[in-house]
């Protein structure tokens, strides 16, 4: 089963070199701007001997008393980080650094030296021409034999930060988890030194004058996941249907739609996903979606019980050994064991029960192309109506209130939906029962009778977002009509009564509208079209946000304020 959320998560997600520059740094000591040395800028030959940094163990050096293992043995869901996942041993390093490049930048990020070095054997000694300089930056990147990233030659540091490769198209995905030597040829390795000196003697030194070791790190994160499904669950009619790895910078599906063996394991490469620390997650039970960063990576186990008509979602957030650590770092190996023991969704907040009851609403609303809904509410409407149509009917679907030939609605479904934190977080409409059955979220009744037809829909409690529901006839591939669902806690109020031309009464009406508005503010203007009864915008207000935005914010990069955009593609 592929969910709508899975499809959305695969779009436009990237693995980027930005983390090389913004997150991973070496020799971080800062120094004052030095006096200009007349010899600076002179080209010197620098002798290099490159190695591979030891891989890190995501569980830490030892098991911690406050680790996620805790004392939750035989709880409904056990999620335990495993200490001692195999790290670099001498053979699990590449035989060469393929398509190696070394580039030098000044303090402003301008490229001032360096070159492409081709394929270099790990541990061999060679020279590269660099500029003698103090307080410069060095970036070493082995782009791999397949060269996922294009050459950095001629690019500023800022331009390097903007270089991206779609993770799902990266050749790293095809590398075996236990690869060694030449089998690691397509892996990308890197080292970023933020503040070093290139001396006249051809040495790379820290600001304190110490030699700098050049150990490149693996770009990808390795995640190993083992899981067991209790026999008691099987005896009670539960089956493990699906396992997914969600909210990584690319969405890798761990299993198919049916599992032949409920106890299994999987190891994958993923891009790093550093999501920080959450102090609210102070026990295994509280390591859940309420306390996690919205974009933190998690494994999701889908469990069905056909007799009880239940579907359960077990969510396990991955990361470091401590309960509050949601980081998946580059050059680090993470090994988790998950034991699914019980169906105790009432007491365990990491388990979610999917309500498969067909939605039914009596909250009828006038039909519109866009419905603005509060989180946690439901509505119904007549799909054949249209407030802007002739006599209130949708003339594309009806003639004089009768359904046109070939326009009878037989099915409705969610065409797409986003998440409540942009590309991460919770699905705005939620999970459907299946790919073909969305009746728990949106349902059609009396689709063959124009005046009695209703579409019922509900939205769960989320931070808000957008979805599109579509109606279909006999052809499931051609939508007859669609409606935009805009989920937001914003409820703008219209202006109340005021006397045309009376500025004082209009000011009071505006204040009353503002006081009644929920989740934001309203705007209005002066001028006859706004203040006179004959005006087109008399007693109207302007919303405080773009279409589809679920927050009004001045933050330029806040995904909640981004409006909807549409691409029209000729067919």
Image (cartoon, rainbow, N blue to C red):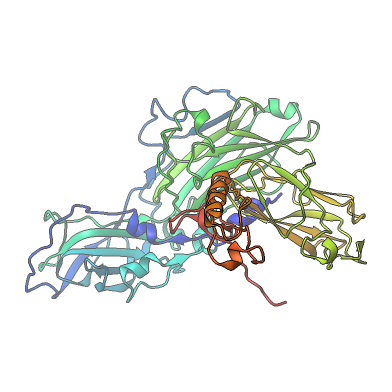
Residue 82 percent across, percent down from the top left: 46, 35
Q: Residue at x 75, y 51 (%)?
A: 435
Q: Does 435 appear above or below 167?
A: above
Q: Does 336 appear above or below 222?
A: above
> Is 88 on the left or on the right of 376, as rendered?
left
The one of 453 and 346 positioned closer to us in this rendering: 453
Location of the C terminus (image quadrant): bottom right
Residue 459 percent across, percent down from the top left: 68, 45
The one of 124 and 87 positioned closer to us in this rendering: 87
> Is 361 on the left or on the right of 4, as rendered?
right
Q: Quadrant of residue 386?
A: bottom right
Q: Residue at x 58, y 33 (%)?
A: 350
Q: Residue at x 12, y 53 (%)?
A: 208
Residue 256 percent across, percent down from the top left: 68, 49
The one of 542 and 199 positioned closer to us in this rendering: 542
Q: Quadrant of residue 388?
A: bottom right
Residue 244 percent across, percent down from the top left: 61, 46
Q: Residue at x 83, y 68 (%)?
A: 396
Whether residue 393 is visible, yes or no, is no
Whether residue 121 is visible, yes or no, is yes
């Amino acid at each position: 089963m592929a969910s709508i959320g899975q499809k959305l998560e695969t779009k436009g997600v990237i693995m980027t070199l930005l983390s090389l520059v913004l997150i991973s740094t070496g020799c971080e000591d800062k120094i004052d701007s030095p006096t200009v040395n007349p010899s600076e800028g002179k080209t010197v030959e620098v002798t290099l001997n490159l190695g591979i940094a030891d891989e890190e163990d995501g569980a830490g050096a030892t098991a911690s008393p406050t680790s996620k293992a805790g004392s939750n043995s035989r709880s409904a869901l056990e999620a335990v980080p495993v200490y001692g996942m195999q790290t670099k041993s001498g053979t699990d390093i590449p035989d060469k650094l393929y398509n190696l490049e070394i580039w030098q930048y000044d303090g402003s990020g301008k490229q001032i030296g360096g070159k492409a070095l081709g394929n270099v054997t790990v541990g061999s000694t060679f020279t590269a021409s660099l500029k003698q300089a103090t307080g410069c930056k060095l970036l070493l990147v082995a782009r791999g034999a397949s060269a996922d990233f294009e050459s950095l030659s001629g690019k500023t540091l800022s331009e390097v930060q903007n270089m991206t490769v779609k993770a799902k198209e990266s050749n790293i995905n095809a590398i075996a988890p236990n690869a060694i030597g030449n089998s690691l040829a397509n892996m990308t390795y890197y080292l970023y030194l933020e503040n070093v000196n290139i001396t006249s003697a051809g040495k790379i030194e820290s600001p304190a004058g110490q030699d700098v070791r050049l150990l490149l790190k693996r770009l990808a994160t390795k995640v190993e996941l083992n899981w067991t499904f209790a026999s008691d669950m099987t005896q009670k009619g539960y089956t493990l249907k699906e396992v997914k790895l969600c909210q990584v910078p690319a969405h890798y599906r761990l299993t198919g739609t049916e599992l032949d063996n409920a106890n299994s394991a999987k190891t994958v490469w993923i891009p790093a996903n550093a999501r920080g620390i959450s102090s609210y997650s102070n026990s295994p039970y509280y390591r859940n979606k309420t306390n996690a960063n919205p974009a933190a990576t998690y494994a999701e186990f889908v469990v069905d019980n056909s007799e009880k008509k239940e579907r359960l979602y077990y969510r396990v957030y991955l990361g470091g050994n401590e309960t509050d650590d949601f980081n998946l770092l580059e050059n680090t190996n993470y090994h988790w064991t998950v034991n699914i023991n019980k169906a105790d969704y009432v007491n365990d907040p990491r388990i979610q029960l999917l309500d498969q009851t067909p939605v039914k609403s009596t909250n009828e609303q006038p039909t519109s192309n866009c419905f603005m809904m509060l989180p946690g509410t439901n509505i119904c409407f007549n799909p054949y109506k249209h407030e802007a149509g002739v006599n209130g009917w949708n003339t594309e679907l009806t003639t004089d209130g009768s359904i046109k030939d070939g326009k009878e609605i037989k099915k409705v479904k969610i065409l797409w939906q986003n998440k409540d934190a942009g590309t991460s977080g919770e699905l705005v409409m939620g999970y459907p029962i299946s790919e073909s059955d969305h009746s728990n979220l949106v349902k059609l009744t009396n689709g063959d009778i124009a005046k009695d037809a209703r579409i019922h829909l509900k939205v769960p409690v989320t931070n808000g977002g957008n979805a599109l529901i579509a109606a279909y006839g006999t052809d499931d591939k051609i939508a007859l009509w669609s409606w935009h669902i805009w989920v937001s806690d914003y409820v703008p109020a219209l202006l109340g009564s005021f006397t045309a031309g009376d500025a004082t009464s209009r000011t009071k009406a505006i204040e009353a509208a503002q006081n009644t508005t929920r989740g934001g503010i309203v705007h209005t203007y002066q001028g006859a079209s706004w203040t006179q009864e004959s005006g087109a915008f008399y007693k109207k207000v302007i919303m405080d946000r773009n279409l589809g935005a679920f927050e009004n914010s001045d933050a330029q990069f806040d995904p909640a304020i981004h409006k909807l955009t549409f691409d029209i593609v000729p067919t």
